[in-house]
Amino acid sequence: MDSNNSLETELKKARQELAGYKIELHQTRGYLQCILQNSEDMIFATEVGGMLISFSKGGEKVLGYSFMELIGTYIKDLAEDPVSFEEFFDSSGQDGPAVQLDIPFRHKEGGTVYFNVSLINLTNREGQSVGTVGVCRDITLWKKIQEDLVRIDRLAEIGRIAAGVAHEINNPLAIIGEASGWAGVVISDAKGLSP
């Protein structure tokens, strides 16, 4: 009897633990869904091979694709350079907890959207890779500002070169002008010396 009571007590305790884990799992799942629905960033999850299994509303907004359109799509196929992205993606499982790189993606309408991409390899309790999570910050505006600054710097350099060329052209002209002025003075002095 005593062993039945202890088994019953253990079973009751296990059920309570399981109920607690279910509540915790439900809360965590709700929390993660809230992040995916409300984040401005593109957040995605893939299975081990890179096929999308989750895609945030922020990603839908920035790239123009709905998650329904992306079902069965590999994340590399959204990148401007799928081969380079695949190399980066593969390194996420080897280089420690997270890898980061700026990567251009294609918008549904054909434009380019630049992201700072952080990839995190997901592992199970046995240490086996089960997928990847990507958090991508839209840096398109930042890239445009950088390109504009480079363009402005180039224009400023062209201006400096033009000013230098103008200075170099003006120097001989000033010498010629000065020499002609001297010639005029010499000629007028020479006229004054003539009888």
Image (tube, rainbow, N blue to C red):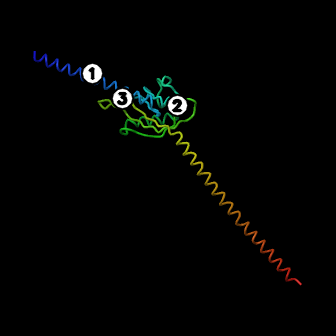
**How many labels were placed on the picture?**
3
- Distance from disc 2 to disc 1, alpha carbons, whole Å, reads 40 Å
Quadrant showing the C terminus:
bottom right
Q: Nearer the viewer, residue 99 or 37?
A: 37
Q: Pointers 1 and 3 in contact (CB under 8 A)?
A: no
Crowding around mark 3 (Cα neighbors within 10 Å: few <14, some 14 to 19, many 20+) is few
Residue drawn at 46 percent across, 23 percent down: 72
How far separated are the C-alphas under marks 1 and 3? 26 Å
**Residues at discs 2 and 1 in contact (Cβ within 8 Å):** no
Q: Nearer the viewer, residue 191 or 4?
A: 4
Label whose residue precedes the other's in the sequence (2 or 3): 2
Image position of 171 (left or right of 115): right
Q: Nearer the viewer, mark 2 or mark 1?
A: 1
Q: Earlier in the sequence, mark 2 or mark 1?
A: 1
Residue marked by disc 1 = 19
Residue 43: x %, y % from top left: 44, 32
Q: Residue at x 50, y 29 (%)?
A: 60
Q: Which mark is residue 87?
A: none
Type of residue at label 2?
A: Leu
Identity of the amino acid at label 3?
Val
| Amino acid type, label 1 | Ala
Residue farthest to the bottom, as pictured: 195
C-alpha span from label 2 to label 3: 26 Å
Front of the two marks 2 and 3:
2
Q: How many other residues sit within 10 Å of disc 1, few (<14), some (14-19) or many (≥20)? A: few
| Residue 167 image offset from top left, x and y in percent | 68, 63
| Residue at left offset 24%, top offset 22% | 16
Residue that label 3 marks: 130
The local crowd at label 2, few if under 14, some if 14 to 19, many if 20 or more residues have their Cα within 10 Å, is many
Q: Which residue is mark 2?
A: 63
Q: Earlier in the sequence, mark 1 or mark 3?
A: 1
